Image (spheres, grey):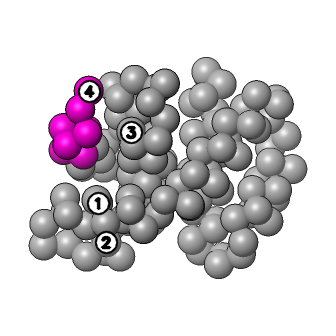
Amino acid sequence: MGKRRKARELVLQTLYAFEISGEPIEAVLANVLNRQNPPHDVAEFTILLATSTVQHRREIDKLIAEKVKRWELSRIAVVDRNILRLAICELLHFPDIPQKVSINEAIELAKTYSTKESGRFVNGILDSVAGLHGS
């Protein structure tokens, strides 16, 4: 497994725990990283992506809400919602990562941690968001 893939999995765990627990992101991150003990570069990217996703959550959630017609953001499964958040954060705020990579990684996370249908759902939303923000 690639280092960034592992980091994205850790970010997903972090965002899920953050949303469910209501604990500060720093405490949740410390807990996840202490439990998983990833290599330094994986931990660095995990921290960067998780904190950036939380920092830009309002902007990201607004984009998701615009894309999911007839659905409240709260009705999207927690795992799918957080996969979308971390991927959209990458699309908007990590220009060094090709959009196609961010989208494909999110689809794989959805297939692994949610359902096959989630992969298609995540793909549709992210393709739509990426279309707004160039390639």
Sooner in the amino-acid sequence: mark 4 or mark 2: 2
> Mark 4 to mark 2: distance in Å?
26 Å
Structural distance between the alpha carbons of marks 3 and 4: 9 Å
Report crowding for label 2: few under 14, some 14 to 19, many 20 or more residues within 10 A (C-alpha): some
Residue density around tag 1, few if under 14, some if 14–19, many if 20 or more, within 10 Å: many
Within 10 angstroms of label 3, few (less than 14), some, or many (20 or more) residues?
Answer: many
Q: Position of residue 6 (x, y in %)?
A: 64, 33
Q: Label 1: which residue?
A: 64
| Residue shown at 70% from the left, 46% from the top | 47
Tag 3 secondary structure: helix
Distance CA(mark 3)–CA(mark 2): 19 Å
Q: Which residue is mark 4?
A: 135
- Mark 4 or mark 1, which is nearer the start of the sequence? 1
User: Disc 2 on helix, strand or loop?
Assistant: helix
Q: Is residue 104 visible?
A: no
In the rendered image, residue 93, in percent from the top left (x then y), is placed at: 46, 41
Q: Is residue 103 above or below residue 120?
A: above
Q: Amino acid at mark 4?
A: Ser
Mark number for residue 73? 2
Proximity of marks 1 and 2: CB atoms separated by less than 8 Å: yes
Q: Amino acid at mark 1?
A: Ile
Q: Which of the two discs, 3 and 1, labels the residue nearer the N terminus?
A: 1
Left or right of 70 on screen, residue 76: right
| Residue at screen point 31% across, 72% down | 73
Q: Amino acid at mark 2?
A: Leu
Q: Quadrant of residue 107?
A: top left
